[in-house]
Image (spheres, helix red, strand yellow):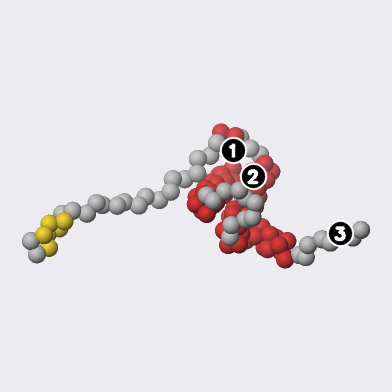
Amino acid sequence: MASLAGCVTAQPVVLIEPAPPYPLLPVDASMSCEAMTASFMFSAKRAARLEFWLEVGRLPGYGTDMFGIDAPRELAAERRRLDALTDLQRTRGCPVMEPGPAVVYERQKLEGASKTPALRVRG
């Protein structure tokens, strides 16, 4: 409650909590190092695609107007999964891959693929 020149106002207190850590599934804990690496790379590709699509804009034929709302939330979830897999790789003694460089690498591959000219069919 605050009192300003005889006027009393009440403002709700807004607490912003950080996102919860990504919950690892039981199958994640039982994966081999190679399987964790494959899962990590799949998540990095997905995060790179989401970042790329958000930058490019709405995809023609995607079929939903909710992409702009859903994609940032999905991207945050992918980032949390990458962090969780990195931590799991460290605790299991596997070779550790860092999320940032992996997503940048996958993003560069996407950007390079989008700049190649379209194939022309003769005949």
Instruction: Indicate the position of residue 20 as horizontal and vertical percent values.
Output: 44, 45
Q: How crowded is mark 1: few (under 14 residues within 10 Å), some or many (20 or more)?
A: some
| Foreground residue among 69 and 14 | 69
Instruction: Indicate the position of residue 123 as horizontal and vertical percent values.
Output: 92, 58
| Cβ atoms at labels 2 and 3 below 8 Å apart | no
Tell me if residue 76 can be seen: no
Q: How far apart are marks 2 and 3 (CA)?
A: 36 Å
Q: Which residue is drawn at 43% across and 48% down?
A: 19
The amino acid type found where label 2 is placed reads: Ser
Q: How far apart are marks 3 and 1 (CA)?
A: 45 Å
Q: Which residue is drawn at 58% across and 60% down?
A: 57
The amino acid type found where label 3 is placed reads: Val
Q: Which residue is drawn at 29% across and 52% down?
A: 14
The amino acid type found where label 1 is placed reads: Asp
Tell me if residue 32 can be seen: yes
Q: Which of marks 3 and 1 is in front?
A: 3
| Foreground residue among 108 and 123 | 123
Instruction: Indicate the position of residue 93 as horizontal and vertical percent values.
Output: 61, 45
Q: Distance between the residues labelled 1 and 2?
A: 9 Å
For marks 2 and 3, the one nearer the N-term is 2
* Kind of element beneath mark 3: loop
Which label belongs to residue 28? 1
* Kind of element beneath mark 2: helix
Q: Name the residue under label 2.
A: 39
| Cβ atoms at labels 1 and 2 below 8 Å apart | yes
Which label belongs to residue 16? none
Q: Residue at x 89, y 60 (%)?
A: 122
